[in-house]
Image (cartoon, grey):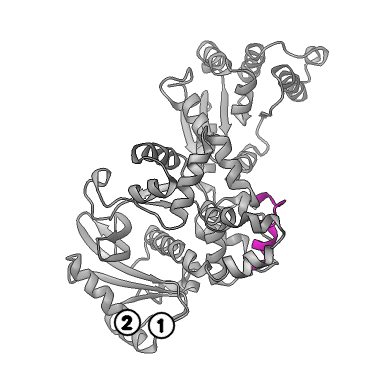
Amino acid sequence: MFRNRAKELQALEDRWRTGQPEFVVLYGRRRVGKTELLLQFLGDKPHLYLLGDLRSERDQLVEVTQRLYDYSRDPLLAAQALPSWATALEYIVRLALQERLVVVIDEFQYFCESTPSLPSVLQKVWDEQARFSRVMLILCGSYVSFMERETLAYESPLYGRRTAQMQLQPLDYLDASAFFPKYSAQDRILAYSVLGGMPGYLSRFDPGRSLAENIRQEILDPVAMLSSEARFLLMEEMREPRNYFSLLRAIAFGKTRLNEISQEAGLPSRGASKYLDVLQDLGLIERKTPITERRPERSRQGLYDIIDNYVAFWFRFVLPNQPYLEEGRREYVLNERILPNLPDYASRRFEDVCRRFLQRRQGQGTLSSIEFDRIGAWWSSSEEVDVVAMHGDEVLLIGECKWTNEWVKIGDLNDLRRKAAVMNAATSVRYALFSRSGFDPNLIKLAKAEGILLFEPEDLFTLGSDQLAAGSFQ
């Protein structure tokens, strides 16, 4: 399923339409949908698509020559393979002198493994020939650190040649929900909490099966792809995966401060900090600070959180239970270890969904009179607010997210008001309550009278509908 890459597709189309030589770097983690995006973009455009693998340089050049022959039908290419990458790239440039041509080099890192000099060769051909042609070159790769180091970094031979770069990000909760059209709103949120927004993960779950059955079949079965994807991800990107495993496991089990994480992982704080920086660069974790912090990089209130939901789920529920899973005790792990703890695990993911929901509403211009420039959370040593929307230094909205089996009541609203006073929020601040299980009728009546925003899971998926625009936001 190809979902909501309109902005990325348009960016590629804009580069295509310039008619000028373009050097585009597209990268992102495995399973995020890079290849599908490229295939959608290529369509019927004149193009060459070269896919890297772990073969030798000679075998790769044989394959490249075959692709060039399929495109050009040049009889000289049928006789023998091109002898070098320089020759192959120069041939491609000559084709692009005649017509606008898209050249995709996908999984660029594999080509470079067999030919370490390829970035330098490409730089020379680009500088001397390609930049005078009509080629649109797209380098694509799944190893984020490699792509940034070998194509974007100052030390790279290719530095300064790119005309555009794009790091493809996971889908948000709303686009991810399209993979499960028959799920209830609650189950769609839970599915997002388990899988996150990676299309390659979302497509593994069968929308015709229950969420619990999908977890059992696609994550807990030791032969299933998702049972070990997190392990492979770290082993591909990291030189010392053991230390990263320890850090991620510590965060998954609730250690959020640097000293707590380092102690749990058995690492010195300084070393742990460096590893955590790498995990942030990969988009697996984030160091969060209270939204009111003016200099977050210096804040002592920073907390670490795993922001990739699948990785968080795997380290919380799969890794610790692998001995049981290897014994074939999937039912035990599912029913005794996962399902009873899934609501508590999902509650943090629900907060993220609620914040993204408000961002979406504002982007559509339907968030009443509230226009904020940032949204996040706030906490102190004794208090915490799940949702805080601000413009400049002014707090415009604060909200609470409840993923429980009980109604949200007037007492919860009063507690939110008390926290607003602790934050020194203005009297005009708006209040929003998000509830998994609905609201007490007395709170609903009060909310209508005082303009309190109330949202249930179903509301988070009716984004942009007339019903919602005419309801809670009026």
Q: In the image, 205: left or right of 410? A: right
The C terminus - image quarter: bottom left
| Residue ID for mark 1 | 439
Instruction: Determine crowd level at label 2: few under 14, some 14-19, many 20+ residues with C-alpha closer than 10 A.
Output: some
Amino acid carrying label 1: it is: Phe
Whether residue 33 is visible here, answered yes or no, is: no
Check disc 2 and report its element: helix, strand or loop: helix
Query: Which is nearer the eye, 29 or 129?
Result: 29
Q: Earlier in the sequence, mark 1 or mark 2?
A: 1
Amino acid carrying label 2: it is: Ala
Span highlighted in magenta in the image: 212-226
Total numbered labels? 2
Identify the image quadrant of residue 369.
bottom left
Pinpoint residue 376: horizontal percent, then vertical percent.
33, 57
Pinpoint residue 123: horizontal percent, then vertical percent.
52, 16
In magenta segment, residue 225? yes
When the figure is inspected, residue 341 is found, relative to residue 54, above or below; the finding is: below
In magenta segment, residue 418? no
Residue visible at 24% across and 48% down in the picture: 299
Instruction: Determine crowd level at label 1: few under 14, some 14-19, many 20+ residues with C-alpha closer than 10 A.
Output: some
Q: Which mark is residue 239?
A: none
Query: Which is nearer the eye, 402 or 32?
Result: 402
Residue visible at 49% across and 39% down in the picture: 167
Is disc 1 in contact with disc 2, using a CB cutoff of under 8 Å?
Answer: yes
The mark lying in front, picked from 1 and 2, is 1
Q: In the image, 342: left or right of 434? A: right
Whether residue 288 is visible here, answered yes or no, is: yes
Q: In the image, 279: left or right of 79? A: left
| Residue ID for mark 2 | 447
Q: CA distance from mark 1 to mark 2?
A: 10 Å
Pinpoint residue 217: horizontal percent, then vertical percent.
70, 60
